[in-house]
Image (tube, rainbow, N blue to C red):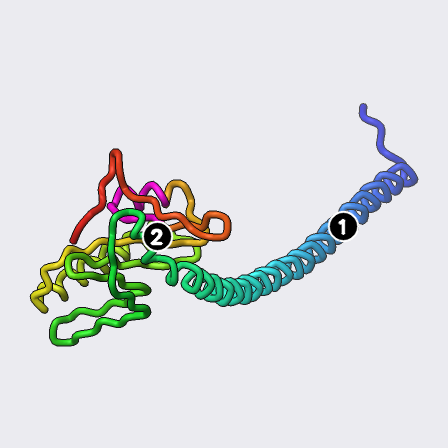
Amino acid sequence: MEAVQTVPEWKAAADEIWAMMKETDRRMKETDRRIEANARQQEKTDQQIKENIREMRESSSRLDKQLGKLGNRFGEMVEYMIVPNLVTKFRELGFEFEKTQRDLVIASKTRQIFTEVDVLLENGDKVMIVEIKTKPNVDDINDHIERMEKLRKDADLHNDKRKYRGAIAGVVFGESEKTYALKKGFYVIEPSGDTFNIIEPKGDYYPREW
């Protein structure tokens, strides 16, 4: 026959159970407190991350503006360095240009033609259109192709039968961009010491005429 627990034994068991319940409740409350603390910390972290992103975007925007201004100054420097000597340099390649024009804007609403030209060299037979960039990229080269096509269209409308060729000048010319420009039939103009060189498309490439 099973022995009946005495009062002291029952009370001891109850006290143990109660103590366990209190400890469990304490741990649950401690866990809740930590979760809340972590949530608050996460909220602060999220806010800090958002603030950092905002500051990075503002810094990036300021940097873009500064680089833009610097790029414009580089472009001006390149123009003043290159333009006065273009006729001489192209003469070394067999061209005799008699006239030079800078910063031309060609706009015709009726003919739907609009484009800008950094430098135009011309004679009675040929026209060379030079685009000047700080660091030419593929998009710049493709844009110059579109520019040449617009100029050809405008020339045809004016009964100008001369051959048009293109060149791209840059302070910094990446090898892949240089190859791409030559492949598209453009002359490449890049700095060399205190002066600059003109690279003519040849070999696998040839000068394109519009």
Residue, disc 2: 89
Q: Relative to residue 193, is residue 72 depicted above or below?
A: below
Quadrant of the snapshot with the C terminus: bottom left
Q: Which mark is residue 25?
A: 1
Residue 171: quarter of image = bottom left
Q: Nearer the viewer, residue 184 or 60?
A: 184
Quadrant of the snapshot with the N terminus: top right
Magenta stretch holds residue 149: no
Q: Relative to residue 158, is residue 167 depicted above or below?
A: above
Q: Is mark 2 on a helix, strand or loop?
A: helix
Three-letter amino acid code of the residue under disc 1: Asp
Residue drawn where x is 22% and y is 41% of the image: 206
Q: Residue 105 carries which label?
A: none
Residue 96: quarter of image = bottom left
Q: Which of 193 and 131 is in front in this view?
A: 193
Q: Give the range drawn in magenta.
A: 178-188
Magenta stretch holds residue 181: yes
Q: Is residue 48 left or right of residue 199?
A: right
Q: Nearer the viewer, residue 41 or 206?
A: 206
Residue drawn where x is 9% and y is 69% of the image: 158
Residue drawn where x is 50% and y is 48% of the image: 193
Q: Is residue 110 visible?
A: yes
